[in-house]
Amino acid sequence: MCGRYASSRAPQDLAGIFGARLDADRAPGPSWNVAPTDEVWAVVERASRRTGEVERRLRPVRWGLVPSWAKDPSVGSRMINARVESVHEKPAYRRALAKRRCLLPADGFYEWVAVAASGSAKAYKQPYFIRPEDGSVMAMAGLYEFWRDPAVADADDPAAWLTTATIITTEATDAAGRIHPRMPLALDPDDYGAWLDPAHQHTEDLRALLRTPAGGALAVTAVSTAVNSVRNNDPGLLDPAP
């Protein structure tokens, strides 16, 4: 599972890294404590409504996928991750895997380890921040969907549409596997185009593009339990725990 992550790079920097056009009337700010239902940056490729040409864009989406057939958007809070082992089979994800894939840029992600009570000390969960050793951006593999709000009569009204995304996960390996059994998948820069291309719809070929972030060269750091609260959000959350 990936339930929190950090994404602090400026959108202009992300647009340059991914060769994307910045497409946003509103912009999620830097976050060191991204939580489900937050707005996050996503890299997508879609046909331009004006020219019909496929364009790569950096745009905001809400984390937690809401299928187009959902009755209301509240289901998104439970659909923040999609397992790579079954993503091509699940009704909520299989159409998005075929046609609506994205990349979710991250500095790294958090996982927790339960620490048993000892003496007068209470049991707690110790958070760890897991990131590429070289400090490079993680291009987490994701899927996105559009949900039409039936309460908005005009379909051309931007408020009528909600764009949401989920992160694809796999069994954790290397350093991350000692912390938690699941981790997000990522893509190598050479594979961004094939993953994002909406015309590429062979799911087995697509799943073969997915990789362990940074080739498994991940740094794991115990950090403060301050990250446990979504109210806390500043660069100090990434500092090593005392």
Image (cartoon, rainbow, N blue to C red):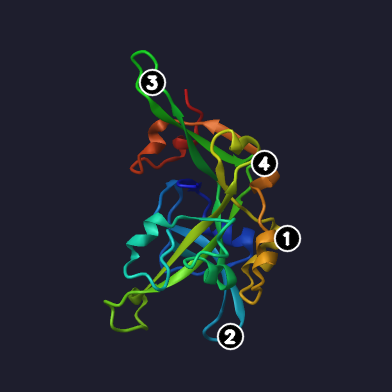
Discs 1/3, front: 3
Amino acid type at circle 3 is Ala
Tell me the kind of residue under disc 2. Answer: Gly
Where is mark 3, residue-wise? 117
Mark 4, residue position: 134
Count of labels shown?
Answer: 4
Residue depicted at 70% across the width and 60% down the height = 208
Sort mark 2 into few (<14), some (14-19) or many (20+) by Cα contacts within 10 Å: few
Judging by the rendered image, the residue that carries numbered circle 2 is: 52
Residue at which label 1 appears: 190
Residue depicted at x 50% and y 32%: 239
Label 2 near label 3: C-beta < 8 Å? no
Q: Are marks 4 and 2 in contact (CB under 8 Å)?
A: no
> Quick check: marks 2 and 1 in contact, CB under 8 Å?
no
* Residue 136 in picture, x, y percent from top left: 64, 47
Nearer the observer: mark 4 or 1; the answer is 1
Considering only order in the chain, which callout, 2 or 4, is on the residue closer to the N terminus?
A: 2
